[in-house]
Image (cartoon, rainbow, N blue to C red):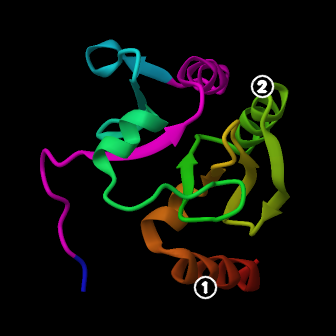
Amino acid sequence: MTHPAHPGRMLFVNIPVADLELSKAFFAKLGFGFNPKFTDETAACMLVGEHAFVMLLTREKFAEFAKLPMADPTTHTLALYCFSVSSRDEVDAVGAAALAAGGTEADGAEDYGFMYSRSFFDLDGHGWQVMWMDPAAAEQGPEAFAAATEDADAAA
């Protein structure tokens, strides 16, 4: 069962960072911008999509919101952050930019035909994936897209 999108709903993901200015510079090199209305010396609102944001928070600021102890992202995975780009070439460009900006590679390129991705760790060790998905696969779902592709190949 699918549920309709909620008009006006926004997503804010909060992550702790050791050095806010270094983190902002890192993500700026990957092409992200920041909303100055929600950015100060303790937090930066990174624009990810039309209604999706990542709040880079100093560890002290993050601790004000968190009720449990903060985990070390270099030794424990609590979440993986994935964002899409518009082409396979852009996946490679963003992945290369992440490494050039001081990130470390998590995985090599993964090519599933309908989806292509690269993964990296940011300066704090948070795991990120940049991916492209064929628009038809995004619309139909991977299984229906694969079946339609097989049918088209068989007819050719």
- The kind of residue on which mark 1 rests is Ala
Q: Name the residue under label 1.
A: 147
For the residue labelled by badge 2, is the local secondary structure a helix, a strand or a loop?
Answer: loop
Whether residue 10 appears in magenta in the rendering, the answer is yes
- Provide the residue span drawn in magenta: 3-32
Residue 62: quadrant of the picture: top left
Q: Can residue 155 be seen in this view?
A: yes
- Residue plotted at (59% across, 33% down): 18
The one of 54 and 30 positioned closer to us in this rendering: 54
Whether residue 103 appears in magenta in the rendering, the answer is no
Q: Name the residue under label 2.
A: 101
- The kind of residue on which mark 2 rests is Ala
- Residue plotted at (64% across, 20% down): 22
For the residue labelled by badge 1, is the local secondary structure a helix, a strand or a loop?
Answer: helix
Between the residue at mark 1 and the residue at mark 2, the CA separation in whole angstroms equals 40 Å
Q: Is tag 1's residue or tag 2's residue first in the polypeptide sequence?
A: 2
